[in-house]
Image (tube, rainbow, N blue to C red):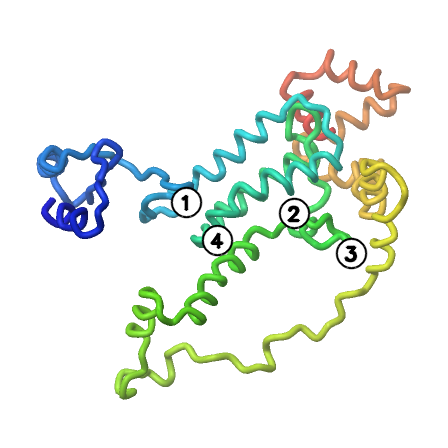
Amino acid sequence: MNILKIYGEATGQEINMAKSEVFFSRNLSQAAQADLSRIMGVRHVLGTGTYLGLPSMVVRSKKATFAYIKDRMWKRINSWRGRAMSKAGKEVMIKSVLQAIPSYVMSIYLIPETTIKEIERMMNAFWWGGGSNDRGIRWLAWDRMTYPKELGGLGFRDLQLFNMAMVAKQGWKLMKNTDTLVARLFEARWKIGDGTRIKVMSDPWLRKEDGLWMNSPQDQGQEGWKHLWKVQAPPKTKHLLWRVCKDCLPTRERLHERIAAWQNAGLYSCLQQRLQRCSTVKEVLFDICCHEEKEMAGKIAMLM
């Protein structure tokens, strides 16, 4: 407490104990934690919270620390359920709302790859899902949808690459602002010195310049995709053209490919019998709902 008092007198700032919290290590006994919290007059918390939009402490499990990002995105997606959104509308919501939620955190911390994959699966399910659920067929993987529109994708953000690029800016600041405290700490930590502690065979060294650039051309097929998105038509119509070109429509051939993967569940034989006997899709669905078990009918509904 004397240290905090001296800090306040030196800076002219006053610490608000009512808004302060203290977090102890698991190695400290419960009695000692309670005593220290009482002496300091600060509320004892069992977990980490957020401060200015960032986690106040990164614990051993980074996945648990950054789970709140996924929860925020999931709540936002749930708030949109029941709204009639076209694919073009969902693209706008993903780019302007969902992908903006983790941007600030990703500029400071490296998010675990598992958390990023879960977030991307949520966005992919939202874009391909229909109506009030996210059970639609994912006709295209997310990594292919992150390609630029000129290369056949939709221009969605690759969150892992974006995270690395944002954190790399911190390294650039360290290189340019060498007078900052953190820059001086890194310089002292990694200083060469007299060279006696250098491990020539195992220490990381700079890569060669000939391995930094990709020589293969990246403009193959760009003209066709550029003209597709410049068509004078509503956005949802251009998205339909994109899905036609990417073979992402539920045609008989594509559905048969999907059904083939479900043969072990008995779905293929169930549908095949109805398609031979019934003349319309409505009759097929009514017959399945009336005569099949609810679980089987549910699986077929999820497939469609």
Tag shown at residue 81: none
- Label 4: which secondary element: loop
Question: Residue at (49%, 63%) from the top-left corner?
Answer: 168
The earlier-in-sequence mark between 4 and 3 is 4
Residue located beneath label 1 in the image: 63
The earlier-in-sequence mark between 2 and 1 is 1
Tag shown at residue 142: 2
Please tell me how crowded label 1 is: few (under 14), some (14-19), or many (20+) other residues with Cα within 10 Å.
some
The image shows residue 213 at horizontal and vertical percentages of 64, 74
Please tell me how crowded label 3 is: few (under 14), some (14-19), or many (20+) other residues with Cα within 10 Å.
many
- The Cα atoms of the two marked residues, 2 and 3, are separated by 16 Å
* Quarter occupied by residue 1: top left
Left of 230 or right of it: where is 160? Answer: left
The earlier-in-sequence mark between 3 and 1 is 1
Question: Residue at (58%, 43%) from the top-left corner?
Answer: 99
The earlier-in-sequence mark between 1 and 4 is 1
Residue located beneath label 4 in the image: 107
The earlier-in-sequence mark between 2 and 3 is 2
Q: Amino acid at mark 1?
A: Lys
- Label 1: which secondary element: helix
Point out the frontmost of discs 3 and 1: 3
Q: Amino acid at mark 3?
A: Glu
Answer above or below: position of 214 versus 192. Answer: above
Residue located beneath label 3 in the image: 150
Answer above or below: position of 278 versus 164. Answer: above
Q: Check if mark 2's residue and mark 3's residue have beta carbons within 8 Å.
A: no
